Amino acid sequence: MNSSPHASSSRWSVESDQLCISLLHLTPDLASRVRLRRDEWTSKGWYDVQKIRFSREQWASLGRPIDKGADEEERDCLREEWASLQHLLMDLLGIERQDIRCDVVGVPGGSRTQYKVRIDDEPLPVAWEVLPWDVTTRDGRALPLSPTAAWACSEARTATHASPQDQLSVLARLRSLLDDASQLMGGRIHFTPSGFLKTFEPQVVSRVGLRWESEPDAEDVVSLRSYAVLKDGAQAPLPLSSIRSGGIAGSDSRRPLLLPEGAEEVLEKVRPLQRRLVGDVAKEMEDPTLLVPEGRDIDSILDLSQYSQRVAGFELLRGRQPGAGREASGLIWIDPPTDPGAFGLTIHVGQGDGSEPLRIQLRSREESMDLLTRNDAALKQAPTSALTVGGHRILPSEALGRQLRTALKLSEQLPEGDESGVALEAGPRSKGREAAIVLELGATKEGSGRTPQSLNPVPWGLLRTAFCPGVTLKPHQQEGLAWLWRHAQTHSPGVLLADDMGLGKTLQVACFLTLRLLGGGGGLRPQLVVCPTILLDNWRQELARFFQEHVWEKPFILHGADLSAVKRGDGLNTEFLSRQRLILTNYETLGAYQRSLLKVDFDVVVFDEAHNLKNPDTLRSRAARALKRSFAIALTGTPVENELFDVWAVYDAIQSREPRVFGARSSFRADHSGDQGGASLRLRLGYPSDECTLLRREKAQALKDLPPKIYQSNAVEMTALQEEQERLIAQQAPKRGAFWSLAALQKLYQHPALLSDSRGMSVETALRESPKTRLCLELLAKVESQGHGERSEKALVFVLSRAMQELLARLIEEKFRLDSVPIINGEPENRRTALASIDAFSKAKGFQVLLLSPLAAGAGLNIVAANHVIHYGRWWNPAKEDQATDRAHRIGQVRPVHVYYPLLHRQGRPEAGFDLRLHELVERKRSLARDFLSPDPDDAQQYAGFFQEGEC
């Protein structure tokens, strides 16, 4: 193990069988990073005044790399968060790098085979019963295990004691996740496989797909085939006969397919569905949930895009498969390199006199590695001596070392046969194959809907008796409630309330549910609200805030401990659920326990943040369509996130019976595409009109007294060094593929340090290397200068990367002398900590800054104390970005909200660069949603006289 120069034996100790890490005498960088996590660690019970404590189980579980997430974007965020925590814990222990080596003693899968781990070439005891905290060197020193090393030791022991058939499964996961850890940690965790493991290369399967295929020798005989979707999106065969115990499959024992957790249970239910008559498997063909064990949330690992919900026959599919991807953006993200095979690096060396940096050309990786070695060695000497490079004498420096490490990492050669290139904007190629033709419900013919002769008015007086004292509805909220009341009486299956963020959609729907409860409209049937996990508590709080206690005594939250309490065998106690007034649950529970929930007869079902249903092929979307209910309400301020098809997906979930607005998805795409797609979609919906099942109000119209949003883009030129690094990325793009290239560009354009390691970077270096970071601080300085004391203004900075968040927090703290700059990332388990940080931010006097992830945008946060929003790390989804902005621009805001977009461009080319292309793409998507949701002024006049009159 290599310990950092400031490491000491006093850093850690074992007390009461817990690992204790001291938080005394930390460097300023470490102290800042610890301070950012102190509240989170306190809530988890780790923080203990001047130290943090961990049990053996906690320490080992922290070391397991993240391989889960709702989607790729969330998974990437969680993985970066994991790496950030590992860096911090290793720094606190004084571990600069830790080598992990795995050995196999015996034949893999044998009854007496042992799996051993060596840490920094030191073996662990062969027969340990309790996970050791450290290993002992030959000279008697105790070396602590990093969390990842502890997890690897635990897994190796599990493999040693596993049955022969399960050994390879454990070993495959160990090998795969240790490879991930090495990549995520940038070499600080160095995994060395030996012996059998050298050639043991499991392929990680991200999702398992299912599709019905007819047998070539009999048209009326079908089989349910499985296939594997790998990490790069490619598909691989997954024969059922190759699946072995423990979740591994494939015919190649050296490169087995590593199935995601939960897939094996599903595939066991697929086995009996081979070579069956169509009539015998009609139920299974219509309902894939029959293959999913009750209580398992596997939407993230199951691909049902080619599974037929309503099967009429079979056809030959060629080219891109359903759900394989969206249309290409048409943007050129990377300039093609002039000589993609040649290595070339120009280093930029400051001369210390304020003149232009000296540029020195390096011709090979070997020359670059030699210079890096000499630079590192010189920095350890006192005093340092100059280096000779290409006839120039230069001083060694931290900045030079960082340049070289980044360049060497970007130009790293992939192992033979490991080129995973996916052409930018190219879709996956596949051979033709037979798959099911899907019949979908058609749209209802115009004029065939049932409309009652007379409608009962909204019982405003009854609603007033349910409110807490002082509660009243704003005019637009009264109109929204009247709209819901009217459509529920017209036998409409469901509606979409798409009000702009911050207009109180939750309150409008809560009032509607209250009237259904008190007025007897729903009989004795329960109401159901499905929302993201982080909003469950928000719904409960809103009901308690606005309504008297007897109205909603205790909504039942079908999550956590209460979910466990109503489990009965593999399902839920549906009799108990049927007796509840209101059930609050999340989308994961809906998908996992849909068989139980489909047995309950609900009155009204509400889908909050309904864009969670935009993929119609997930289990949660299928469950949403199938729930028994009288009426469904979808709530989302962003019905169009990426394309107009998002609207079809939401409507398919809420209108599972006639009268339906839309027909099959294929006809929707044909009817509502191109430049006139938004206009034709409005016409189909009849939007806006008194018959329309979609209601959308903008804050500018509904809240006349709400201050405006003021947008501005701020461009700045990148450094010559960043251009050099972008050239290296372009060289690697054909080999490493689109996903790697775009991710690398996103990091480079935020800060080049994200490409290597930003830990310990001095403030001067951080600002010198990134003009965009300097621009961000300049924008904050202008905000600070605009007021003092109680009139001071505050800012929110949205950035996705955890490493960038931590770097910005340290820079902002130091520049503006702030006690802290909290970071909020939207994790449900940290919601209370986030709310406490927002409360402190709002009450604090003087200039303040809050850093947030765009993932926290949908968490129901109200931060009107801020009236400046900086989108530093852009989000691909404009709807998420708008949600982020509207944390500040909502009811309660009294000042104009200023929204800033810092954009980095190439030298001498203000129109070129990744930031500009991403800005163009986001604005194009935003324009698509705006054109659809904002009708012409003449159309808007149709709203006049639409709503029922009456005051609350």
Image (cartoon, rainbow, N blue to C red):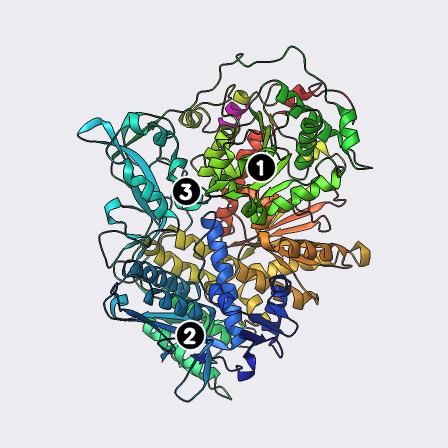
- Give the residue displayed 66% in from the left and 44% down from the top: 538
Which badge, 3 or 1, comes first in the chain's sequence?
Answer: 3
Crowding at dot 1, Cα within 10 Å, few <14 / some 14-19 / many 20+, comes out as few
Image quarter of the N terminus: bottom left
Left or right: residue 237 versus residue 721 is left
Image quarter of the C terminus: top right
Is 123 situated above or below 755? below
Q: Which mark is residue 576?
A: 1
Residue 541 in the image, given as x and y percentages of width and height: 69, 44
Tell me which segment is drawn in magenta.
673-682
Provide the secondary structure element on which disc 2 rests: strand
Distance from disc 3 to disc 1, alpha carbons, whole Å, reads: 21 Å
Tell me the chief SS of the magenta region.
helix
Number of numbered discs: 3
Is 820 situated above or below 564? below
- Of residue 772 and residue 584, the one placed in the foreground of this image is 584
In the image, is residue 676 part of the stretch drawn in magenta? yes
Which badge, 1 or 2, comes first in the chain's sequence?
Answer: 2
Q: Which mark is residue 98?
A: 2
Residue 517 in the image, given as x and y percentages of width and height: 68, 29
Q: Which mark is residue 293?
A: 3
Q: Which amino acid does label 3 sit on?
A: Pro
